[in-house]
């Protein structure tokens, strides 16, 4: 998510692939760089990616503005032992 405008980009969309790029290994930043339409840049790692619920229109567009997405809560299921 862009910290300035709160827009999210969908990784599976071609535009998301253009806006989210790997940083060079020599770069001291985390491995991904987001270049938002609002011209802000943000560095992040895989642990900071979250699942979101979006409309079909938003999915086809490749991004969602504030109030067009819903974060899906992290659901950890208890593990059961097998006998």
Image (tube, grey):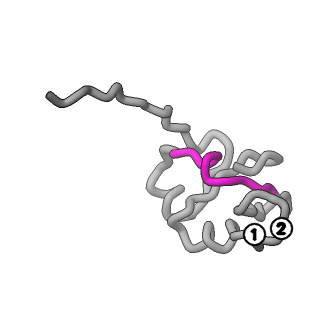
Find out whether residue 83 is within the magenta segment: no
Q: Nearer the viewer, residue 28 or 16?
A: 28
Name the residue rendered at 55%, 38% in the picture: 71
Q: Position of residue 77 (x, y in %)?
A: 36, 29
Q: Is residue 50 above or below residue 59?
A: above
Q: Nearer the viewer, residue 61 or 43?
A: 43
Find out whether residue 44 is within the magenta segment: yes
Q: On the rendered image, what quadrant is the C terminus found in?
A: top left
The kind of secondary structure element at disc 2 is loop
Q: Which residue is mark 2?
A: 27
**Residue at the front extreme?**
83
Magenta residues?
A: 42-51
Residue 79 image-quadrant placement: top left
Name the residue rendered at 56%, 62% in the picture: 11
Q: Position of residue 66 (x, y in %)?
A: 68, 43
Crowdedness near tag 2: few (<14), some (14–19) or many (≥20) residues, C-alpha within 10 Å: few
Q: Are marks 1 and 2 in contact (CB under 8 Å)?
A: yes
Name the residue rendered at 84%, 61% in the picture: 28
Q: Which residue is mark 1?
A: 23
Give the mark count.
2
Q: Is residue 7 above or below residue 21?
A: above
Residue 34 image-quadrant placement: bottom right
28 left or right of 62?
Answer: right
Q: Nearer the viewer, residue 59 or 82?
A: 82
Name the residue rendered at 77%, 64% in the picture: 35
């Amino acid at each position: 998510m862009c910290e300035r405008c709160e827009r999210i980009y969908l990784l599976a969309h071609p535009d998301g692939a253009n806006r989210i790029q790997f940083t060079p290994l020599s770069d001291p930043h985390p491995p991904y760089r987001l270049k938002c339409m609002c011209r802000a840049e943000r560095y992040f790692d895989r642990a900071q990616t979250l699942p979101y619920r979006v409309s079909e229109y938003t999915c086809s567009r490749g991004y969602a503005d504030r109030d067009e997405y819903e974060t899906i809560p992290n659901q950890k299921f208890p593990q059961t032992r097998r006998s």
